[in-house]
């Protein structure tokens, strides 16, 4: 029989077990923090009906959607009835609209599932990736305090993940609109074009961008171009500075949108502080826009202080209406999203993901095949006591068993030979500390539990 | 704008948040027990390359595979390059063969992901469902002790799930083959046909099946038909009875396959007992076959004692070679699978899934909008102490807030009004116990932690 070459499809990130353990720990930490803030779990099917998923014309090619066809459908040449979700927002809108009468509002949900996009093949771009989202959806209205809760969650999640210092950057879409209106750029599309030019600052430099803004089609005055460049360069340092920079915006003349944006950001900042987020963890950044057609108020990006080149690791914002395609109800919301597959990949590339210890705490070695019943009994006792335990079932050399445990990241190896059995003890090798000790059979469980609990309380470097 | 009716595709099980919490708890329990036995996590992409997934001719229509096409591929009329996995076994084979040199053998993995089958629409049949699998894969050989570990894991998982008494039923494919050989039914396909007739016992009765076996194409003698019916009716009661029934099989004359099957089952039973599985939890059932072309040794099914009508809730067995399509290596294995979506649905139908309490422990109510900063500070303190806490952000009537907490399954509601604030206390309403008490602000976290830990140690009815 000819062999088929086993291979994963291009553009997916498949992990070896120790990497998967590290990834799973990120998922667990994020889920715990989402639940800590009272968000409820939702999972939706990977596929949605095509007409439900693709409500916007042109959306399918933009999103590079994967369509689903069962064998029968292909034979009959039918149009695909289903397609894979490309984000968790459209499924959320469908979920909330479909189950509207069974949900309590404001509806707080988290969702951590994979999404699919037929991206062109490129290093660091994935066709299947995890998104970890939270959203709060109101009915008719939604208190601004929820906009402040998002940074509190971001702060909790990334503190718990322990991947270094980070800064949650805030802006407000109304403030952006008001600012551009003041400069006479009133058209939303034109505002976006200006922001797109401004995005080139890092690559092209200030002079290039200033020249562009002064030329066709923008034709800005020297002062207007300077105002834009000063504005988007704004980064606050500390809470009081943030409030002062907001107030300072009024100096150049005001309008309704600008006032509203300043007012909203002021309240959001105040609430963020009330929620106990340290002021070093958040700042204003007036250059953040996040796509013109969706967000309407507060917007967020999060940057690792030591790795700004990674870009935003958690973004989101406030939107006017979640499910206008599916429901007559007005459903305003605010949410954030972590693209975990890409983040994991980037952290690994940057050397920030430590090789995880195994989920297995203990390997009971097989020194003597005749004593296997004894080894099985020891394992049963440890498992019943909450310790993850593997038994060496195959009779191989002890050295090989140790090598296996070491490579697998298993911390403790137990050895019971004739001598230990006669003395009623177990030899415990601690591969992490490179030490060993003996413990009486009766004290084994208790001793290992203490060791494991201590190391969980104080993680290894 | 015309509204699109929001709806899930047919054949999927989408859950409301409280159901999702209950489902998530099943997943967590299963994962914990899999890890307790030292199995390592693996996740594979939902899609596989078509030629890798569909190695067997005819497999695609049998399995009703969903093919994937990106927008571009449909336009160009290409054959689909990818398809969704229909189980976790083919992806495991591909994974092990692809990463063979990076894995340690025996390779112990668990995988809990959704799989996809284009089933005809039918109540209780799902097109998307979770499978929770464990397998141990050896290289060249795999100790029989692993066959005994599977029932130990099944016992741990279903004990922890707490869905009632269950029995793990065992059989052995070599024992089956040997038994039929002794009766002169040597062809494997013919053996399967006999077993398929025997499967009709419940529906058609003994007389019908006996008549079928005696007629064309089986033409069995009266004695042979009786031997088959006696054989497949075998259910052991207790450990010694199981061993005795195995030995009794030798009375009718022996052959290599029968001897091998008896020997294997004998050792597996002995090891199961050594692993501490109570003898009430396992039994021989000689009628179990589980598909002729895959399993080669021990086979398992698991039945809820009070709900045999649900059928097997966890099945599996030993196989000779996992990845013959992808690798020249011989990779024998043994594994089990839980179809969790279907099990959850059946348990819910049978009223065996209790409505879960919320993942949210505490709601800080909003008695007085002016005190929101205080409520946010209380929540921050509770969260830092490990308590899942939601804050009522919208100013609504207190009665409405209590109703919300009650419907959502949140146990504690905190109330701080002017009176409580002046006295430095918090009023705590325990919705589960329908009681209330006051506690000083300083003792709030400690008090709630004690209450929550106590209830986790002793779950409510």
Image (cartoon, coloured by chain):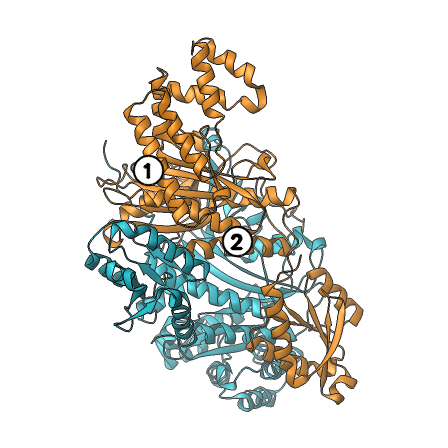
Chain colours: A cyan, B orange
Can residue B56 be seen by looking at this rendering? no
Q: Which residue is mark 1?
A: B51
- Using a 10 Å C-alpha cutoff, classify the residue at mark 2 as few (fewer than 14 neighbours), some (14 to 19) or many (20 or more): some
In this view, the residue in front, A299 or B149, is B149
When the figure is inspected, residue A15 is found, relative to residue B350, above or below; the finding is below
**Image position, residue B216 (x, y; %):** 45, 8
Residue at the image position 73 percent from the left and 66 percent from the top: B431
Q: Which mark is residue B91?
A: none
Q: How many marks?
A: 2
Residue at 42 percent of width and 64 percent of height:
A25
Q: Quadrant of residue B261?
A: top left
**Chain of the residue displaying label 2:** B
Most extreme residue toward the front is A422
Front position in the image: B139 or B259: B259
Percent position (x, y) of residue A344? 38, 65
Q: Eyeballing the image, is B77 above or below B275?
A: above
Left or right of B9 in this view: A358: left
Label 1: chain letter: B
**Left or right of B328, for residue B187:** right
**Label 2: which residue?**
B160
Q: Position of residue B221 (x, y in %)?
A: 43, 9
State the CA–CA distance, disc 2 to disc 1: 40 Å
Residue B428's quadrant in the figure? bottom right
Q: Dividing the image into 4 quarters, which one contains the C terminus of chain B?
A: bottom right
Does residue A336 sit above or below B422 in this rendering?
A: above
Looking at the rendered structure, the secondary structure element under dot 1 is helix
Disc 2 vs disc 1: Cβ atoms closer than 8 Å? no
Q: Residues within 10 Å of mark 1 (few under 14, many from 20)?
A: some
Report the front residue among B68 and B134. Answer: B134
């Amino acid at each position: 029989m000819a062999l088929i070459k086993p291979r994963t499809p291009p553009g997916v990130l498949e992990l070896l077990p120790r990497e998967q353990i590290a990834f799973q720990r990120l998922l667990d930490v994020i889920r715990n923090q989402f639940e800590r803030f009272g968000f409820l779990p939702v999972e939706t099917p990977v596929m949605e009906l095509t007409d439900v998923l693709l409500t916007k014309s042109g959306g399918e090619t933009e999103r590079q959607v994967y369509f689903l066809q069962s064998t029968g459908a292909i034979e009959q040449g039918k149009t695909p009835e289903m397609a894979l979700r490309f984000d968790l927002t459209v499924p959320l809108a469908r979920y909330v609209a479909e189950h509207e009468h069974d949900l309590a509002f404001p509806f707080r949900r988290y969702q951590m599932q994979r999404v699919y996009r037929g991206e062109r093949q490129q290093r660091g771009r994935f066709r299947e990736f995890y998104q970890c989202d939270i959203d709060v959806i109101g009915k008719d209205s939604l208190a601004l305090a929820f906009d402040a809760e998002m940074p509190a969650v971001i702060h909790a999640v990334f503190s718990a993940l322990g991947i270094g210092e980070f800064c949650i950057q805030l802006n407000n879409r109304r403030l952006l609109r008001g600012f551009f209106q003041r400069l006479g750029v009133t058209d939303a599309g034109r505002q976006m074009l200006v922001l797109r030019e401004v995005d080139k600052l890092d690559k092209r430099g200030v002079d290039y961008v200033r020249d562009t803004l002064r030329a066709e089609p923008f034709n800005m005055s020297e002062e207007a171009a300077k105002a834009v460049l000063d504005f988007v360069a704004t980064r606050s340092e500390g809470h009081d500075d943030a409030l002062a920079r907001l107030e300072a915006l009024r100096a150049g003349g005001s309008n309704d949108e600008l006032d509203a944006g300043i007012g909203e950001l002021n309240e959001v900042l105040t609430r963020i502080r009330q929620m106990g987020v340290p002021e070093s963890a958040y700042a204003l950044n007036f250059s953040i826009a996040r796509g013109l057609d969706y967000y309407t108020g507060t917007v967020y990006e999060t940057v690792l202080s030591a790795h700004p080149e990674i870009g935003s690791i958690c973004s989101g914002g406030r939107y006017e209406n979640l499910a206008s395609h599916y429901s007559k109800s007005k459903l305003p919301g605010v949410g954030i999203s972590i693209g975990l597959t890409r983040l994991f990949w980037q952290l690994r590339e940057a050397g920030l993901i430590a090789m995880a210890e195994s989920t297995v705490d203990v390997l009971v070695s097989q020194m003597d095949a005749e004593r296997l019943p004894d080894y099985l009994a020891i394992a049963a006792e440890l498992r019943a006591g909450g310790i993850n335990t593997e038994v060496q079932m195959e009779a191989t050399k002890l050295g090989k068993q140790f090598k296996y445990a070491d490579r697998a990241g298993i911390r403790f190896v137990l050895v019971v030979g004739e001598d230990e059995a006669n003395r009623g003890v177990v030899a415990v090798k601690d591969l992490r500390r490179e030490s060993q000790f003996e413990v009486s059979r009766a004290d084994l469980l208790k001793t290992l539990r203490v060791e494991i609990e201590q190391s969980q309380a104080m993680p290894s470097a």
